């Protein structure tokens, strides 16, 4: 192509002259090119013809009223034509919206969030096993505690490894946890502390058999698991050693269950103000008040009629303490599960989740009830 094709624009009167920029042509010039750069006549013959474009009127094109002539080249961009072809008919000619008022959506009923029938059935079954072992042979109930501890440790360590890659050694934790419960029942608080120390030491030594990478986080998680599950559960065995031990344990279980039930029922029905939305969005302040009210009433009844030398006002204080500790324990478990990115610790109990999902409020409540029982009525 010669230099003239990209050089200065043609002078006035020559083919292709369009006057000032953006204005109308100075005068119609026969043979002028309608648009585009100017070309010499020989070169214009060598260029390829432009592809034909359908008439813009077929796609709803408009006219240039200022210039008094219809645009001959169709849409300014080719995509406009393609989009017009690809648009469905209902999008090209949308139906006018009706002025009639739309019916309001039907209000959704509150959901309990879990299978209540399965949860109630499993709860009743566990209650029968616990009560039967508690009042028939104390040693059998100690075995029930030990089994629950081992299963809880298995769930906790499994989730830690799956979600965080933390390998807390399960074998020393399971053996030490079961020994901790038995030692607490046989030797009291001193036996429980000694077993806890030995379990922590065994965890440190056991982890030395593997590569050192991750040693600190693994043993830290192991010691935490030993304290969180078996050591706190040992206080249930300590309650059992008293003369009225089965009744103390039953009071502890009843108050915790009643507190959870009151929080669940009142929060589900009346809950509007979140208690700790960043930790557990489902818990409400109204639910906490329900837990306190239910637990205090149950505590007054239990201390008055089930515990030797107990009084109703002591039950009120005991119920208040149980509601607080059970709620904090539930929030603590929720914090762990939120950090792990899981909803339940396991699936062993239909309608409840795993064992740890049932122990979350029981574990921190056990030392609280044991201590208040000792203060109110003594340890014998």
Image: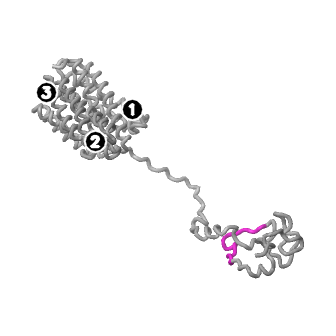
Q: Is residue 227 magenta?
A: no
Q: Under tag 2, what secondary structure?
A: helix
Residue 345: percent from the left, percent from the top? 30, 43
Taking 43 as reference, is 128 above or below it?
A: above
Location of the N terminus by quadrant is bottom right
Asked if labels 2 and 3 touch by Cβ distance under 8 angstroms, the answer is: no
Report which residue position mark 3 lands on: 186
Please state the extent of the stretch shown in magenta in the rendering.
51-64
The Cα–Cα distance between marks 1 and 2, rounded to whole angstroms, is 34 Å
Label 1 vs 2, first from the N-terminus: 2
Circle 1 crowding by C-alpha within 10 Å: few under 14, some 14–19, many from 20:
many
Q: What residue lies at 24% left-to-right and 32% top-to-bottom?
A: 201
Label 3 vs 1, first from the N-terminus: 3
Report which residue position mark 1 lands on: 286
Q: Under tag 3, what secondary structure?
A: helix
State the image quarter where residue 85 is shown. bottom right
The Cα–Cα distance between marks 3 and 2, rounded to whole angstroms, is 27 Å
Residue 50 disc label: none
Q: What residue lies at 41% left-to-right and 34% top-to-bottom?
A: 276
Q: What residue lies at 28% left-to-right and 30% top-to-bottom?
A: 364
| Res 165 visible | yes
Residue ranking furthest to the left: 137
Label 3 vs 2, first from the N-terminus: 2
Residue 157 disc label: 2
Location of the C terminus by quadrant is top left
Residue 6: percent from the left, percent from the top? 78, 70
**Nearer the viewer's eye, disc 1 or disc 2?**
2
Q: Residue 149 versus residue 4: which sits nearer the camera? A: 4
Q: Residue 235 versus residue 10: which sits nearer the camera? A: 10
Q: Under tag 1, what secondary structure?
A: helix
């Amino acid at each position: 192509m010669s230099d003239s094709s990209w050089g200065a624009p043609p002078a006035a009167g020559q083919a292709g002259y369009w006057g000032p920029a953006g204005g109308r042509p100075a005068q119609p010039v026969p043979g002028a090119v309608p648009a585009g750069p100017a070309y010499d006549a020989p070169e214009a013959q060598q260029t390829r013809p432009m592809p034909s474009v359908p008439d813009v009127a077929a796609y709803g094109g408009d006219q240039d009223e200022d210039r008094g002539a219809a645009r001959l080249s169709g849409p300014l961009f080719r995509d406009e034509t393609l989009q017009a072809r690809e648009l469905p008919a209902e999008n090209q000619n949308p139906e006018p919206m009706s002025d009639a008022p739309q019916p309001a959506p039907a209000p959704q009923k509150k959901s309990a969030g879990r299978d209540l029938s399965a949860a109630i059935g499993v709860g009743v079954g566990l209650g029968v096993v616990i009560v039967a072992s508690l009042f028939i042979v104390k040693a059998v109930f100690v075995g029930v505690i030990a089994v629950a501890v081992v299963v809880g440790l298995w769930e906790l360590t499994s989730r830690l490894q799956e979600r965080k890659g933390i390998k807390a050694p399960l074998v020393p934790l399971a053996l030490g946890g079961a020994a901790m419960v038995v030692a607490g029942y046989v030797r009291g608080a001193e036996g429980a502390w000694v077993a806890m120390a030995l379990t922590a030491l065994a965890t440190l030594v056991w982890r030395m058999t593997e590569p050192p990478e991750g040693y600190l986080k693994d043993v830290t998680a192991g010691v935490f698991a030993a304290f969180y599950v078996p050591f706190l559960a040992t206080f249930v065995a300590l309650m059992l050693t008293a003369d009225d031990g089965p009744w103390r344990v039953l009071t502890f279980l009843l108050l915790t269950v009643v507190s959870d039930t009151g929080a669940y029922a009142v929060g589900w029905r009346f809950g509007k103000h979140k208690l700790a939305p960043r930790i557990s969005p489902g818990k409400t302040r109204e639910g906490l008040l329900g837990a306190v009210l239910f637990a205090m009433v149950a505590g007054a009844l239990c201390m008055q009629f089930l515990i030797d030398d107990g009084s109703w006002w002591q039950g009120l204080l005991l119920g208040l303490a149980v509601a607080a500790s059970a709620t904090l324990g539930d929030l603590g478990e929720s914090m762990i599960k939120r950090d792990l990115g899981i909803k339940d610790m396991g699936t062993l109990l239909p309608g409840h989740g795993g064992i740890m999902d049932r122990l979350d409020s029981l574990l921190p409540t056990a030392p609280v009830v044991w201590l208040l029982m000792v203060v109110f009525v003594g340890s014998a």
